[in-house]
Amino acid sequence: MYRHLLVPVERSDASVEAIGHAAELARSLGARITFVCLHAGASDDAAQHRHIAALLARAEAAARAQGVPASVLALHGDTARDFDLVCIAQGSVAPSVPGAAVLIAPCDARPMVAKAVGALLAVHRMRSDAYDDALRTPQPDAQTIDRLREAHREETALTTALRERTSTLDAELDELARLAEREAAGLARVARSIANGEAVDDTLLACARFACERMGRIEGVVLPAARRHLRDADWNALAR
């Protein structure tokens, strides 16, 4: 039985699907996960490193939501650990881990699923980048905050469809709604501070953490469940 999974993380839709698959597998096995970005040390680009940190944080949130112990491998290329299974995305190259088996995560090839999920994940990347931009400036601009306050149409449509098909995710969806409410309330305070010419406090950082947790849980719990429970007609509607 596998006890420790190594899961490479990339900025791709297939990687998100692999993370969700790995988290569900680890939960069923009682295993733990270590996430790693194998390209983390390959560039001195500060923006790239921030993007990688955001990806890893969302992956950890996905595992936590599944009740799976998870950590991040900080050292680039250091795979000399007790890993016994490497779970990679379709089209990815597995890192060399002596003695470990390699599992290529299954990929849902239905075009309407890829389109709907791709649109949702594009919004996640946009929001992550927007938070990154806002947090790097002493006083974020109102336009960036307005972008972050926009309604999450793709998320709302997905969770609504999922509630109609199953009640098994109700507790998780309720928690996601609470996180969204806390983020929205915080962003409203930030917007008021900017409008009044006041300095933005740690509220924006708290909002970013709420958003990261919510996006990770959607990617690691909601999307895998949606692939199981939603019908083709549901996906066609979501992909429009």
Image (cartoon, helix red, strand yellow):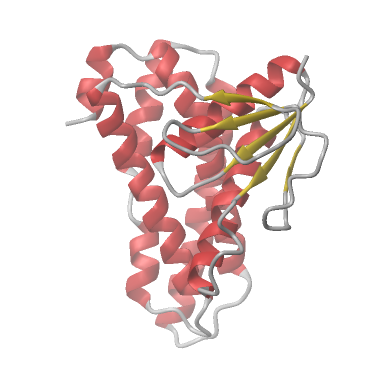
The x and y percentages for residue 42 are 56, 64
Which residue, as the protein is rendered here, is positioned at the far right? 82
Residue drawn where x is 61% and y is 76% of the image: 201
Residue drawn where x is 35% and y is 49% of the image: 123
Q: Is 181 situated above or below 189?
A: above
Instruction: Mark yes or no: residue 10 visible.
Output: yes
Which residue, as the protein is rendered here, is positioned at the far bottom? 197
Tally of numbered tags = 0
Q: Nearer the viewer, residue 187 or 23?
A: 23
Quadrant showing the N terminus: top right
Q: Nearer the viewer, residue 36 or 61?
A: 36
Instruction: Mark yes or no: residue 173 visible.
Output: no
- Which image quadrant for residue 203? bottom right
Residue drawn where x is 51% and y is 31% of the image: 18
Q: Is 122 situated above or below 39?
A: above
Q: Is 192 situated above or below 115?
A: below
Left or right, 2 with reference to 226? right
The x and y percentages for residue 139 are 48, 84
The x and y percentages for residue 182 are 56, 51
Quadrant showing the C terminus: top left
Residue drawn where x is 73% and y is 30% of the image: 68
Left or right, 61 with reference to 100? left
Left or right, 121 with reference to 173? left
